[in-house]
Image (spheres, coloured by chain):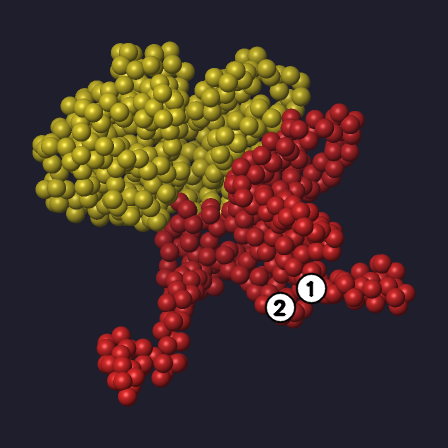
Chain colours: A red, B yellow
C-alpha cells in the first residue's frame, strides 16, 4: 500500500511525467535522441555540401567576372577543357598509384603484425605505425622536402654508394622524372605514400587478424603451395580490409593540396585548383565543379567497394 | 568575396553613399584610449620582441597609449578581407588588391588625416596612391611597400643580371651552364604581370601600357612567354621559406623574389644578392586601414600616428626588407634602418615599380577590353600544367 503511494508521488512530479511519457512512447524518445546529430548531419554537413553543389550550376560572366545566378551547365563545360582534365587525370592517377603502392607495402607489415607479432612486438608495431601520425603533417612534409632535395641526404647517400647513375636514370624518365626528386612526380608520390601508409596498414591488419589460422593449415594440408594459399585464401578474405584502407588512401590523396604544393613540379592537383579558383579569382562555380569531381569518383569507388563486401564487417 | 568588376561598381556606388555618411562618422578629435586595439596583419609585420628581442614596436606603444595590442595574422589578401568581413577588428594592413575590395565592401572607413599629426611626413609618392584614396578620400595611412626583386646567386652571376630575360628565356648563364631547371617563378597568376612587364620593354609593338591591363593579344603574348618559362622552371615558388630552401638545396640560382628572402639568406651567409633589372619590376604597397565599425577608434588613431612617427617603420624595414611609408624613417635614426639599408630595399626605385592591382575587364588604357583576373587564374593553371 505504502509502495504504490510512493510510486504515484514520484510520477506526479514534472520530471516524472516527462520520464513516463518518454517510456510510453519509445519512438518519441528515440527521435529526441537522434534529432541533434541528425540536424548536424543533415543541415550543417549535407546542407553545406548541397549549397556547394548548387554553386557549380551557376556560372561566371565572361565579361564582367560576376557570378550569374541562373542554372546552367556552362561551368561543367569549362571543367572539361584540356587543362582542367589534365588536373583531374593527374590527381586520379596519383591517387591510384599511391593506393596501389600503399597496399603492396602495407601487406607484409600488416601480415606480420596480425600473424606473428605478440606482446611487446605488437606494441612496437602499433607504436611504429601510429608514431608518424602524432607529429605535425607539415613538419613531415617539409622534412621530406629536405630529404629529397638535389643537395639533400638521399642524393648524398646515392653519391656515396656510387649509385648516382640509378637516380639520374630514374629522373631522366619523362613524366615521372625531373630536375631532382623533390621537383618530380616521383617525389610527390613517395611523400604521399609515406604520409598515408598508416591508414592502409591498420584496416588491413584488422582484416588479416580475422582470417582463422586453421584455414591456412587446411589449405596447406590439401597440398597448396604458399602462393596458392595466399591467392585463394588469405587475399580474398583480407580484401575487405584492403578496400577499406584503399578508401582512405585514395580519398586522402584525391583531396590533398599541401603536399603537391611543397613537393613536386608545381602542376596543380584538384585541391589546389579549388583553392586557386575560390580566392581572389572569385570563380566559385568552377571551384564547386572541381569539388564535385572527387565526390563523384569516391561515389563510384564506394559503390564498387560495397559490392566487394568492404562494409560487411561494419 | 568580391570580384574585381563588382568591386569597381561598388566603389562607384559606395562613394556616393559614403560621401553623405562617412563624414558624419569620421571622428574630429581623439578621445581617451579604450584600452585595447585589434589588428589584422601580415605575418612578421607587427613584432613585440617575441621573435627577436631587438625587433619590438609594440611594447612602448602599449605603455604610452594604454592600448593593449592584439594581433591576428593573415596569410593572403583573401584571408584579410574575410577577417574584416567577420568584424571584431579595428585595423588591417591591407595590400593593393585587398584595400579596394575593403573600401568597396564598406568594411573600412575614411580616415581623418588631420588627426594623424605625422601625416605630412608620409612619402609624397604614397599620399594619394589610388589603392587607398578614392575620390580624394583617404581610407588609411600608408604602411610599407616593396619591389619584387630579381634574386640571384653571386657565385653564378659575378655582376647583377641586367634583364629579367635570365628567368624568361633559355640561355647559358655566366657559369657556362644552361638556366634550365635553375630558375624559378612565382606560383600565382599575378606573375602574368611580370611577363607583361618584360614584354612592355622588349615588344613595344604590343602596346602594353600597364602590366595589369592587358587586352586579348597582349595577354596571349604574355602567356606564350610564360609557356616558354615553364620549360625552364622545375618548381614554382609559393612559400618564402620553400624558395629559400630551393636556393640553398635545389641549385636554383635566379628568381623573382622579395627583399625579405634576400635579407634572410644574406644574414645566413648565403652568396645571394638582388637587383631590379632594366625592365623595372612589379611590387606591393600596404596601407593601415580602419574597420568601418571599429570598437576602439581612439586607440586606432593613436596606432596610426605611432606607425608614422616611432621606430616602427625603421625597424620593420630592417626586419621585413620593405620600405617605410615615411622616408625620414630611413635617415633620422629613430630605429635601426639607415639610408643605405633603404636603398638596398629599393627605396630609390619607386618609379621603376608597377604596384599590384587587381586586373579588371574595365580598364582605361586598353579601351575597357582587358582580360579579368579570374581568366588569369585559370590560364596560369594551364601554363603551369604544361598547356
In the visual, does A175 lie left or right of A297? right
The residue nearer to you, when weighing A97 against A225, is: A225
| Marks 2 and 1 belong to one chain | yes
Which one is in front, B222 or A38?
Answer: A38
Between A247 and B196, the one nearer to me in the picture: A247
Of residues A207 and B81, the one nearer the viewer is: A207
Chain designation of label 1: A
- Count neighbours of disc 2 (C-alpha within 10 A) and say few if under 14, some if 14 to 19, many if 20 or more: few
Q: Residue, x 67% and y 56% (percent of image)? A: A205
Work out whether B304 lies above or below A188: above
Residues at discs 2 and 1 in contact (Cβ within 8 Å):
yes
- Give the farthest residue toward the right: A223
Instruction: State whether residue A52 appears in this view.
Output: yes
Residue B23 shown left or right of residue B63 in the figure = left
At 31% from the left edge and 18% from the top edge, which residue is drawn? Answer: B314
Residue B292 in the image: state x and y as whole percent. Answer: 20, 43
Circle nearer the N terminus (2, 1): 1
**What residue sits right under mark 1 in the picture?**
A210
Percent across and percent down for residue B132 are 26, 34
Question: Residue farthest to the bottom?
Answer: A1
* Label of residue B355 in the image: none
Q: Residue at x 13, y 45 (%)?
A: B21
Q: Secondary structure at mark 2?
A: loop
Q: Disc 2 and disc 1: Cα gap in Å?
A: 10 Å
Image: B253 above or below A267: above
Q: Position of residue B252 (x, y in %)?
A: 59, 26
Residue depth check, mark 2 versus mark 1: number of the one nearer the observer: 1
Residue B282: percent from left, percent from top: 42, 29
* Residue, disc 2: A313
Amino acid at each position: 500500500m505504502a509502495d504504490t503511494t510512493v510510486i504515484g508521488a514520484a510520477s506526479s512530479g514534472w520530471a516524472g511525467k516527462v520520464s513516463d511519457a518518454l517510456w510510453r512512447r519509445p519512438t518519441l524518445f528515440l527521435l529526441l535522441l537522434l534529432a541533434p546529430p541528425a540536424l548536424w548531419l543533415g543541415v550543417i554537413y549535407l546542407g553545406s555540401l548541397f549549397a556547394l553543389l548548387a554553386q557549380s550550376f551557376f556560372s561566371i560572366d565572361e565579361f564582367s567576372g560576376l557570378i550569374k545566378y541562373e542554372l546552367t551547365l556552362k561551368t561543367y563545360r569549362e571543367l572539361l577543357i584540356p587543362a582542367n582534365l589534365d588536373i583531374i587525370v593527374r590527381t586520379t592517377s596519383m591517387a591510384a598509384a599511391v593506393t596501389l603502392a600503399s597496399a603492396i607495402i602495407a601487406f607484409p607489415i600488416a601480415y606480420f603484425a596480425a600473424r606473428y607479432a605478440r606482446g611487446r612486438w605488437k606494441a612496437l608495431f602499433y607504436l611504429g605505425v601510429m608514431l608518424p601520425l602524432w607529429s605535425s603533417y607539415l613538419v613531415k612534409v617539409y622534412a621530406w622536402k629536405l630529404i629529397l632535395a638535389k643537395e639533400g641526404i638521399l642524393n648524398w647517400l646515392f653519391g656515396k654508394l656510387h649509385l648516382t647513375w640509378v637516380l639520374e636514370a630514374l629522373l631522366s624518365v619523362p613524366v615521372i622524372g625531373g630536375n631532382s626528386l623533390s621537383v618530380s612526380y616521383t617525389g610527390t608520390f613517395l611523400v604521399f605514400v609515406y604520409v598515408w601508409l598508416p591508414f592502409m596498414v591498420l584496416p588491413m591488419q584488422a582484416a588479416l587478424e580475422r582470417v582463422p589460422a586453421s584455414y591456412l593449415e587446411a589449405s596447406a594440408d590439401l597440398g597448396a603451395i604458399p602462393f596458392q594459399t595466399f591467392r585463394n585464401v588469405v587475399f580474398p578474405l583480407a580484401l575487405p580490409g584492403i578496400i577499406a584502407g584503399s578508401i582512405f588512401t585514395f580519398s586522402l590523396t584525391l583531396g590533398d593540396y599541401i603536399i603537391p604544393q611543397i613537393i613536386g613540379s608545381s602542376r596543380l592537383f584538384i585541391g589546389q585548383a579549388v583553392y586557386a579558383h575560390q580566392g581572389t579569382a572569385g570563380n566559385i562555380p568552377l571551384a564547386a565543379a572541381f569539388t564535385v569531381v572527387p565526390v563523384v569518383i569516391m561515389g563510384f569507388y564506394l559503390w564498387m567497394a560495397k559490392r566487394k563486401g568492404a562494409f560487411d564487417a561494419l | 568575396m568580391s570580384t574585381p568588376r563588382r568591386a569597381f561598381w561598388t566603389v562607384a556606388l559606395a562613394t556616393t553613399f559614403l560621401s553623405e555618411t562617412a563624414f558624419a562618422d569620421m571622428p574630429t578629435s581623439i578621445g581617451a584610449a579604450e584600452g585595447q586595439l585589434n589588428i589584422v596583419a601580415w605575418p612578421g609585420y607587427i613584432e613585440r620582441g617575441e621573435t627577436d628581442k631587438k625587433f619590438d614596436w609594440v611594447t612602448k606603444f602599449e605603455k604610452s597609449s594604454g592600448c593593449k595590442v592584439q594581433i591576428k595574422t593573415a596569410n593572403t589578401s583573401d584571408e584579410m578581407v574575410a577577417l574584416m568581413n567577420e568584424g571584431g577588428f579595428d585595423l588591417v594592413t591591407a595590400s593593393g588588391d585587398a584595400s579596394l575590395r575593403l573600401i568597396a565592401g564598406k568594411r573600412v572607413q575614411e580616415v581623418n588625416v588631420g588627426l594623424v599629426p605625422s601625416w605630412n611626413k608620409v612619402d609624397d609618392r604614397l599620399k594619394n596612391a589610388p589603392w587607398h584614396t578614392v575620390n580624394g578620400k583617404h581610407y588609411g595611412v600608408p604602411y610599407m611597400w616593396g619591389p619584387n626583386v630579381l634574386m640571384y646567386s653571386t657565385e653564378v652571376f659575378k655582376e647583377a643580371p641586367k634583364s629579367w630575360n635570365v628567368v624568361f628565356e633559355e640561355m647559358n648563364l655566366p657559369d657556362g651552364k644552361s638556366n634550365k631547371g635553375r630558375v624559378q617563378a612565382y606560383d600565382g597568376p599575378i606573375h602574368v604581370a611580370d611577363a607583361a612587364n618584360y614584354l612592355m620593354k622588349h615588344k613595344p609593338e604590343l602596346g602594353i601600357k600597364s602590366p595589369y591591363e592587358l587586352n586579348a593579344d597582349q595577354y596571349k603574348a604574355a602567356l606564350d612567354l610564360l609557356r616558354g618559362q615553364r620549360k625552364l622552371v622545375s618548381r614554382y615558388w609559393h612559400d618564402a621559406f620553400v624558395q629559400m630552401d630551393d636556393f640553398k638545396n635545389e641549385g636554383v640560382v635566379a628568381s623573382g623574389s622579395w627583399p625579405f628572402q634576400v635579407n634572410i639568406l644574406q644574414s645566413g651567409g648565403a652568396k645571394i644578392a638582388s637587383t631590379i633589372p632594366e625592365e623595372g619590376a612589379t611590387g606591393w604597397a600596404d596601407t593601415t586601414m580602419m574597420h568601418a565599425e571599429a570598437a576602439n577608434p581612439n586607440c586606432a588613431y593613436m596606432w596610426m600616428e605611432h606607425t608614422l612617427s616611432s621606430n616602427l617603420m625603421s625597424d620593420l624595414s630592417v626586419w621585413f626588407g620593405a620600405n617605410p611609408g615615411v622616408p625620414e624613417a630611413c635617415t633620422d635614426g629613430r630605429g635601426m634602418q639607415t639610408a643605405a639599408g633603404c636603398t638596398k630595399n629599393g627605396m630609390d626605385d619607386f618609379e621603376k615599380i608597377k604596384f599590384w592591382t587587381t586586373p579588371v575587364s574595365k580598364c582605361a588604357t586598353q579601351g575597357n577590353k582587358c582580360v579579368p583576373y579570374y581568366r588569369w587564374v585559370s590560364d596560369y593553371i594551364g601554363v603551369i600544367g604544361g598547356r
